[in-house]
Image: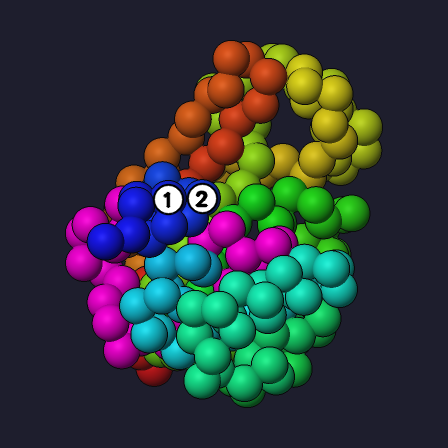
């Protein structure tokens, strides 16, 4: 019997929460937009989900392909692509679940943030679930130093594009989406703030 680590890998605890709430279930198509080395994909690969992933870093994508060869050898290597999330070549509405975990806050500016978000949203099937974790200002509004626009220095020394609750509410409305649950924000020792934003794509 696999250990918890072997079964779930380093899955984001808030993504695991979506599994516990049965919003993600076997048979769904999972697309990780900005997958990194695949920490959120171990369970889905192991359990036979149809998994797709993209990242602009070739080494990260190769790590995901290695995981897939080990855990889900029937999946084609073409499911895992070296592409920026705003330029993914996957078909429209090809996924039931899109994961965007610690990705959008790397946007350079408003234009790239919107391109990254819309690129990730495009591949989501109507009725599908959009799971997003991103850095925000929420709960630490006075602790960040503005650089320009929505780019800030965080107390942990990182430069990030930071959203706030009004922006996320506005984007939810613009996308024509339904907020699946209230925003959840974790303040990490007053060094950074991470918000979980979970949406349902409404059917036309």
**Most common secondary structure along the magenta stretch:** loop
Q: Which residue is drawn at 59% across and 17% down?
A: 191
Residue closest to the far left: 21
Do the residues under discs 1 and 2 have CB atoms within 8 angstroms? yes
Q: Residue furthest toward the right?
A: 147
Q: Is mark 2 on a helix, strand or loop?
A: loop
The CA distance from mark 1 to mark 2 is 7 Å
Percent across and percent down for residue 61 are: 66, 65
Crowdedness of circle 2 by 10 Å Cα count: few (<14), some, many (20+)?
some
Is residue 37 magenta-colored?
Answer: yes
Q: Residue at the location (42% across, 48% down)?
A: 9
Left or right side of 167 for 62? right
Residue 172 occupies which quadrant of the picture?
bottom left
Q: Residue 75, how many percent across, how many down?
A: 48, 82
The image position of residue 147, as x and y in percent, is: 81, 28
The residue lying toward the viewer, choosing from 81 and 170, is 81
Residue 137 within the segment the image draws in magenta: no
Which segment did they paint magenta? 17-40
Q: Which mark is residue 5?
A: 1
**Mark 1: few, some, or many residues within 10 Å (few <14, many ≥20)?**
few
* Most foreground residue, 42 or 182: 42
Residue at 34% over, 82% down: 204
Q: Which mark is residue 17?
A: none
Residue 135 falls left or right of residue 155: left
Quarter of the image where one finds residue 38? bottom right
Q: Is residue 191 visible?
A: yes
Residue at 50% in and 32% down: 194
Task: Check disc 1 and report its element: helix, strand or loop.
Answer: helix
Taking 56 as reference, is 94 above or below it? below
In this orientation, does residue 120 appear? no
Kindly identify which numbered label has been placed on residue 10: 2
Relative depth, front residue between 96 and 127: 96
């Amino acid at each position: 019997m696999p250990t918890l680590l072997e079964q779930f890998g380093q899955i984001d605890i808030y993504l695991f929460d979506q599994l516990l709430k049965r919003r993600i279930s076997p048979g769904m198509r999972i697309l990780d937009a900005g997958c990194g080395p695949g920490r959120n994909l171990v369970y889905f690969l192991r359990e036979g989900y149809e998994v797709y992933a993209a990242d602009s870093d070739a080494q990260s994508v190769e790590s995901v392909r290695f995981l897939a060869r080990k855990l889900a050898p029937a999946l084609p290597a073409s499911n895992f692509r070296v592409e920026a999330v705003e330029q993914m070549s996957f078909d429209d509405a090809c996924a039931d679940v899109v994961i965007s975990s610690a990705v959008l806050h790397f946007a350079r500016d408003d234009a790239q943030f919107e391109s990254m978000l819309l690129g990730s949203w495009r591949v989501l099937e109507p009725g599908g679930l959009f799971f997003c974790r991103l850095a925000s200002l929420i709960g630490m509004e006075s602790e960040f130093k503005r650089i320009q626009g929505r780019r800030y220095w965080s107390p942990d020394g990182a430069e990030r594009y930071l959203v706030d609750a009004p922006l996320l509410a506005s984007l939810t409305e613009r996308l024509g989406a339904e907020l699946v649950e209230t925003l959840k924000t974790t303040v990490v020792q007053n060094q950074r703030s991470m918000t979980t934003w979970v949406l349902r794509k409404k059917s036309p």
